[in-house]
Amino acid sequence: MQTNLRQQLMDALNGLMPPVAPDPDMDDATRLDACADENEYASRVVEVGMQLVLRRRMEARRAEIEEALARMDAGTYGVCEDCGEDIALARLFANPTARLCVHCQSDRERGPLPRCA
């Protein structure tokens, strides 16, 4: 089973774009004096912002996958980090980077219960 999950993680990792270094020319592209008008400047600022968001998401996804592979190598893959119980295989196949069982994930998403006044 872990072989299939490892392959799924490797495929996901290989499917990501390679890490991209920040483009130093983008700093020049967003200078007001490098733009024809304010509309072009606004468009460039939005474009640079979107590229930054996408880069950060890609880096976070890459880190999740690499951490899951490291847990496989360490023998802790598939064990909930909160309660120590096994994570259901169906959950791992649906989300191979899962670090928590469904119950603990649900508890975290709900957050702490509000205190009574």
Image (cartoon, rainbow, N blue to C red):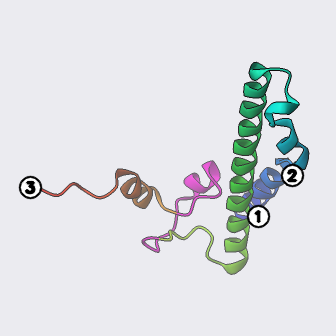
Residue 51 appears at what percent x and percent y? 77, 40
Please, what secondary structure does the residue beneath circle 1 have? helix
Say whether disc 3 or disc 1 marks the residue closer to the N-terminus: 1
Amino acid type at mark 1: Thr
Dot 2: element: loop
Secondary element under disc 3, as helix, strand or loop, is: loop
Marks counted in the figure total 3
Location of residue 83 by image quarter: bottom left
Residue drawn at x 73%, y 42% is 54
Amino acid on which the number 2 mark rests in the picture: Val
Q: Could you say which quadrant of the image residue 40 lies in?
A: top right
Q: CA distance from mark 2 to mark 3?
A: 51 Å
* Residue that carries the numbered disc 1 in the rendered image: 3
Q: Are marks 2 and 1 in contact (CB under 8 Å)?
A: no
Quick one: 52 or 60, which is closer to the camera? 52
- Name the one closer to the observer, 23 or 103: 23
The answer to whether mark 2 and mark 3 are in CB contact below 8 A is: no
What amino acid is at disc 3?
A: Ala
Instruction: Specify few, some or many for label 1: CA neighbours under 10 Å numbering under 14, 14-19, or 20 or more.
Output: few
Would you call the spot at circle 3 few (<14 residues within 10 Å), some (14-19), or many (20 or more)? few
Label 3, label 1: how many angstroms apart (C-alpha)? 52 Å
Q: On the image, numbered disc 2 is attached to which residue? A: 20
Q: Is residue 81 left or right of residue 6?
A: left
- Determine the CA span between mark 2 and mark 1: 29 Å
Q: Earlier in the sequence, mark 2 or mark 1?
A: 1
Q: Which residue is mark 3?
A: 117
Q: Residue furthest right?
A: 25
User: Residue drawn at (52%, 59%), measured in percent from left and top?
Assistant: 88
Is residue 39 part of the magenta span, yes or no?
Answer: no
